[in-house]
Amino acid sequence: MLRSENRIFTTHTGSLPRPADLVELIRAREAGEPLDAQAFAARVQSAVTEAVGKQVESGIDSVSDGELGKPSFATYVTYRITGFDGENLAPRTSADAEAFPEWAKTLVPNTMKRKFCVGPLAYQNKAELEADLANVRVAAQAAGAHEVFMPSASVGIIADIMENQFYPTDEAYYHAIAMAMKVEYDAIAKAGFILQIDAPDTAMCRHTRFRHRSLEDFRAWQSQCIDALNEALVDVPREQIRFHTCWGNNESPHVHDVPLKDIVDLVLRVKAGAYSIEASNPRHAHEWRLWEDVKLPEGAILMPGVIDSTTNFVEHPELVADRIEQFARLVGRENVVAGTDCGFGTAAGRMTPHPEVVWHKLHALAEGAELASKRLWGR
């Protein structure tokens, strides 16, 4: 895993804007409409090649495939794991939506198609995973990328989105998810890439799933999910794992978010070599001070979000540099890699920053990292 030994390295959180024509193909696939599988695969491949090239041009060191062929960062698993079926049409809401009902009416409906767990879970469609790995490998080599990471859904977020109707207990369900996803986790690491675990559940589910329950109940649930996740990660070297958490990739009030101080011990319990944590969100931008007292695990890297992923504001490089330096002073410059709060295309067809703005934001991230590097290394 890249470490900022001579300068601040840059990355992001995985998902990137999908081309409009690819979004339409994904929507058709989700709706069960006839689809030319070869044409779909070819379009995903060309889109990944373009996206990886743009990341490198923007100054991003650790790149991904942008999750371009996936319907969302989490529901893609229903194409790879047996046991999911039907469609859960029950509305998903949050404490913010309940507290601000008029604001909630302005929200764009979530485009993720949620299913139920109705049978034994087993990872059987490795062809899509292998295609993703091949696509990004070729694209990264052509673009000259320094490092490749591949996002993969956490046990907790799958359990949250896909309601269990089969397993007798929650613990049994989490274990089944973990054993199924272990196939994907191991394959990404075996391919030589960095495995990123996408786990917004670690923070977000406090104000969604557990909005009417206690913090203790939420922490107990998260503890179960993390135990199952660590079980799935047992064969992946720690230095090949980065763990991402956030409070939900949306421009909302966020007044009911759980403070980082109440979950940071759980986050750091995850077996990982790097921790990607939202830090530009205005409700959490002050929490950099937490690292005055909280210590990273030995040898671990912090990947704070130094640009946001929910607005069309393009951060000034000086602000980005200031944010990077705040963390570097507390955890050490060599232990910081500059990242983003969340992804820019977490679900197909649901974007907040305009696609053309995204690349300007990533360029500002790289410029800010260059400024911070000059100050932190004195050259």
Image: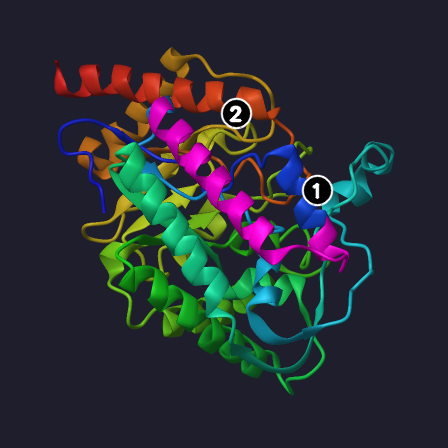
**Residue at horizontal 67 percent and vertical 46 percent from the top:** 25
- Residue positioned most to the bottom: 168
**Residue at horizontal 51 percent and vertical 28 percent from the top:** 308
Residue 311 x/y as whole percent: 60, 24
- Please state which amino acid type lies under the numbered disc 1: Glu
Question: Mark number for residue 297?
Answer: none
Residue 109 visible somewhere in the drawing: yes
Label 2 neighbour load within 10 Å: few <14, some 14-19, many 20+: many
Residue 80 x/y as whole percent: 55, 68
Residue 126 x/y as whole percent: 46, 69
User: In the image shown, does 329 or 69 lie closer to the viewer?
Assistant: 69
**Residue at horizontal 24 percent and vertical 49 percent from the top:** 300
Q: Is residue 138 above or below residue 252?
A: below
| 252 in the magenta segment | no
- Please state which amino acid type lies under the numbered disc 2: Val
User: In the image shown, does 219 or 70 lie closer to the viewer?
Assistant: 70
User: In the image shown, does 330 or 354 lie closer to the viewer?
Assistant: 354
The residue pinned by badge 2 equals 358
Q: Earlier in the sequence, mark 2 or mark 1?
A: 1
Residue 67 visible somewhere in the drawing: no
The residue pinned by badge 1 equals 24
Question: Is mark 2 in CB contact (under 8 Å) with mark 1?
Answer: no
154 with respect to 232 (left or right): right
295 with respect to 159 (left or right): left
Residue interval drawn in magenta: 28-57
Given this view, does label 2 or label 1 mark the residue nearer the observer?
1
State the predominant SS element of the stretch in magenta.
helix
74 with respect to 210 (left or right): left
